């Protein structure tokens, strides 16, 4: 079987790692890829929906898995399906559940999915009038994709007015700011639950805790994720039941009612408050770095699960009764400006962690940094403490100039 994986992060490395030893997988190609995927398959330069479709036709790819949101929102799945190519991911219309926060919020409201109270705005003046009558904090979101930067928590009216101006008039995130979602601020802890979809039903994985902020103690700017632990230590059985009843089941019904069913992944970004579990957002893909802790714990064969979903069969997911910790080693300065091209040393001295490269490339005989999140160290163990000790020991061994990582991943 020939597989094409689209994307170049640690998420794609973890998916590839889970598939690489499957005897049915004869060739793996990565659109983009990184230093790990280069070791387990072949990185290709083709990008964009049409180039990738041509590549898949030429190589007779049997299955394509899409990592990031942009190609989904650009219609990669629709294009592949037009040419009878098998692809795991939602069509453009369903990908809008991630691509448009306005569409997504309306879907949640129409299907009585528990979410923060919100209003959608297309007019600058209406948005300004509205915030003038609200209490704070208040959350203002650019509706379109803004590289994870489009959500701004405003503490007062001055902030809110400046934010609306920046998004809608200055268009700091371009067309993402044409529409805004303005919603109530929810206080609690977050959890990521990712489910497989077989076109009818959703099959959730264990909940993951993602460390989104750049600094220790959840300080500093938001990032793509500086580390993860699974299962989330805070997300109890009661939270799961609440999620199932008020979010998962109405989502399944809503997808059917609005003819948005798909075969692929769906990611629920949850906020658990003292009033229960709320849905903050959908992502129509696996998470990064959530995938890096889920794949080592998943007991099922990943190809079997995907094949079953593709055929519309139900799947029974099973996870090891262990804890997994993922630590992201990043380039100093990330998520802001950073330099790249530095040699990553001592990789041969890594003891018990799995290394999933992300923003790293081969250069001659060695590895160099080429992105913000450079690599992930992942360990599984009976306890969080053991898994945490393993990744931190290996993080101390590895070094590259200006390396940066959080000190408190998996520390509760
Ligand atoms: P989103 O892209 O909608 O998940 O938002 C990104 C991040 O902003 C979330 O992971 C939360 O940390 C925060 N956030 C989003 N919506 C809210 C909300 N209504 N209340 C509090 N924090 C929020
Ligand atoms: N780690 C959050 C995301 O993948 O969107």
Image (tube, helix red, strand yellow):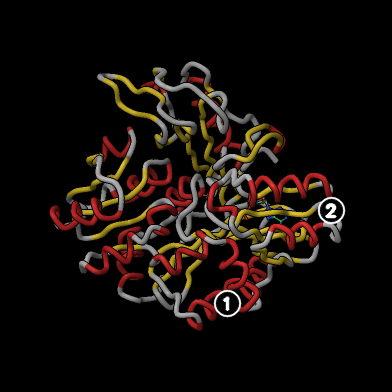
Is 9 rendered above or below residue 340?
below
Residue with the mark numbered 2: 136
Q: Return the disc, 1 or 2, that comes first in the chain's sequence.
A: 2
**Image coords of residue 23 (percent x, y):** 20, 53
- Asked if residue 223 lies left or right of residue 368, the reply is right
Q: If the image is split into quadrants, where does the C terminus sit?
A: top right
Q: Secondary structure at mark 2?
A: loop
- Residue 325 appears in the picture as rendered: yes
Which residue appears at 74% of the width and 67% of the height? 117
Which residue appears at 84% of the width and 47% of the height? 156
Give the CA distance from mark 1 to mark 2: 32 Å
Disc 1 vs disc 2: which is toward the camera? Answer: 2
Mark 1, Cα crowd under 10 Å, few <14 / some 14-19 / many 20+, is some
**Image coords of residue 143 (percent x, y):** 59, 58
Which residue appears at 66% of the width and 60% of the height? 181
Residue with the mark numbered 1: 249
């Amino acid at each position: 079987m020939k597989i094409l994986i689209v994307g170049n992060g640690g998420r794609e490395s973890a998916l590839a790692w889970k598939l690489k030893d499957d005897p049915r997988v004869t060739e793996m190609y990565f659109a983009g890829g990184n230093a790990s995927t280069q070791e387990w398959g072949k990185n290709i330069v083709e990008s964009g929906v049409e180039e990738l479709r041509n590549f898949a036709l030429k190589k007779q790819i049997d299955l394509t898995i899409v990592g990031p949101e942009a190609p989904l929102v650009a219609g990669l799945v629709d294009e592949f399906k037009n040419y009878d190519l098998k692809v795991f991911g939602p069509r453009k219309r369903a990908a809008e559940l991630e691509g448009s926060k306005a569409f997504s919020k309306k879907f949640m409201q129409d299907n009585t999915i528990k979410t923060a109270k919100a209003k959608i705005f297309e007019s600058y003046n209406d948005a300004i009038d509205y915030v003038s009558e609200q209490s704070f904090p208040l959350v203002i979101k650019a509706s379109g994709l803004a590289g994870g930067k489009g959500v701004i928590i405003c503490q007062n009216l001055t902030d809110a007015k400046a934010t609306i101006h920046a998004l809608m008039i200055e268009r700091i995130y371009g067309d993402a700011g044409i529409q805004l979602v303005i919603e109530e601020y929810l206080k609690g802890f977050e959890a990521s639950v990712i489910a497989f979809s077989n076109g009818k039903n959703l099959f959730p994985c264990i909940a993951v805790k993602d460390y989104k902020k750049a600094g220790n103690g959840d300080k500093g700017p938001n990032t793509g994720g500086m580390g993860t632990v699974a299962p989330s230590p805070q997300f109890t059985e009661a939270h799961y039941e609440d999620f199932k009843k008020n979010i998962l089941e109405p989502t399944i019904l809503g997808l059917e009612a609005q003819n948005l069913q798909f075969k692929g992944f769906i990611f629920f970004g949850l906020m658990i408050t003292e009033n229960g579990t709320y849905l903050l957002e959908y992502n129509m893909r696996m998470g990064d770095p959530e995938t890096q802790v889920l794949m080592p714990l998943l007991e099922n064969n990943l190809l079997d699960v995907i094949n079953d979903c593709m055929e519309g069969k139900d799947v029974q997911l099973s996870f090891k009764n262990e804890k997994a910790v993922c630590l992201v080693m990043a380039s100093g300065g990330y998520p802001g400006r950073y330099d790249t091209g530095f040699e990553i040393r001592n990789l041969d001295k890594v003891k018990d962690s799995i290394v999933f490269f992300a923003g790293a490339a081969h250069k001659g005989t060695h590895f160099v940094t080429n992105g913000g999140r450079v690599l992930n160290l992942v360990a599984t163990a009976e306890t969080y403490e053991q898994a945490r000790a393993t990744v931190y020991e290996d993080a101390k061994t590895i070094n590259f100039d200006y390396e940066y990582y959080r000190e408190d991943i998996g520390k509760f």
